[in-house]
Image: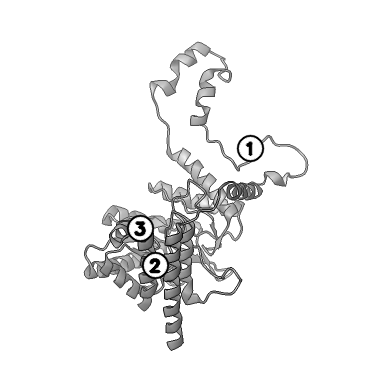
Amino acid sequence: LGQAISEVDSVGNPLMYLNEPDGTQVPGPLMPLKGAAVIAKNCRKPATAQVITPLDLELIIEIGVVLKGSWNEYKKEPFLMSVKEPTSPLKLTGMPGEVLFVMAQKGLPCHLTPMPLLGLNVPMSIPAGVCIVNAEILAVWTAVKAVNPDAPVEASIVSGSMNMRYGQPNFAAPEVILSDMMISHLYEKYYRLQCDQGISWIDANYPGTQAALERMYKLMACAALGKINYPTGALASNTVFSPEQAMIDLEMGAALNKFLDGVKITEETLCLDLIQRKGIGGNFFDDIQVASNFRDVLWLPQLLDRSPAVCGPVDRDKDIVHSAYKKWKKILNDVPPYQIDKEKAKEIDNIVKKGSRIILDNMKRM
């Protein structure tokens, strides 16, 4: 689906390879390698993948080299990498640290994503949470640069707050979005370091009104800081992918792009001659100017129902989720699936076989 949609730039997490085609469950330690292979073989836009251990990293780099042709070409624009998370408060556990160490040695981008939870691993205070996260990012940043001064460091932030009714984290509440904005702004203004916000993390479990509201709320907060980042389709704290929600997210992204385009004021857009010609009480609907310009001026949604209101039963065929369902089904019917070069597919399969054997042998020895 991601390959078929031109607006989608990259495909990756939260894709998880849980089961083989015959239904058998994939052992946990094999999921990162098999998931990366699925992404690599099924689209031209591979992005992030899981990387749990240094061995995962080495095997996934091999897959990247197969796609790019050489290590030097892969290193110019590495993909199938993973973000690493300091554990608040002020801790970096062993395995993420080992992966970051190897990534730094190789000069690969080291991406950090703290996940502070107000009331759990940081105090119930937004400034206190920002303070802890700032210390975590600066500490790991310093450690990476100590290993390799040339290793790029990137950061993003996914704040949460403890739900005092259900005892679980929330990721799309106003206090969370405000916390993310503060950290992102801090890093861009004072450290000149890109720091994205966790837009894909929302609380809604199903596609629809709540999910659209939460996603747009986070998108607008991100846009307020001059950032454009449109992850699509993720629900339930980034644990579920919904193709219907992906279609809705893309529509909201298009709406936000239209909003961010702003208004261009020129002699042509002022239309003074036209206004004078029509005069007081004039009507512009029948003028060629409207027909020529409405596609540029208006945002024309594909999923939102803007038909006139009518009395009577609700027409579920016009529900945005149903419309989104029909849209993604049509995309898959209209666009043939991507097929990677057979030789490259064979090389990737061999890497997966080799890696699976090593990982399973390591599991037996543990």
Name the residue at 39% across, 65% down.
Answer: 63
Where does the image place residue 238, in percent across and percent down from the top left?
Answer: 51, 62
Frontmost residue, 9 versus 42: 42
Could you say which is closer to the camera, residue 75 or residue 221?
75
Residue name at image x 36 percent, y 66 percent: 61
Q: Nearer the viewer, mark 1 or mark 2?
A: 2
Q: Residue at x 48, y 15 (%)?
A: 274
Residue 237 to residue 194: above or below: below
Q: Residue at x 48, y 69 (%)?
A: 34
Query: 149 left or right of 351?
Result: left
**197 to 267, vertically: above or below:** below
Image quarter in which the C terminus is found: bottom left
State the residue position of label 1: 306
Q: What distance separates the C-alpha of mark 1 from that of mark 2? A: 46 Å
Q: As shown in the figure, which amino acid type bears the numbered disc 2?
A: Ile
Q: Which residue is mark 3?
A: 68
Which kind of residue does numbered mark 3 sit on? Lys
Question: How many neighbours does mark 3 have within 10 angstroms: few (below 14), some (14-19), or many (20 or more)?
Answer: some
- Looking at the image, can residue 279 be seen? no
Q: Which residue is mark 2?
A: 60
Query: In this rendering, would 284 be left or right of 350?
Result: right
Choose top left, top right, bottom left or bottom right for residue 100. bottom left
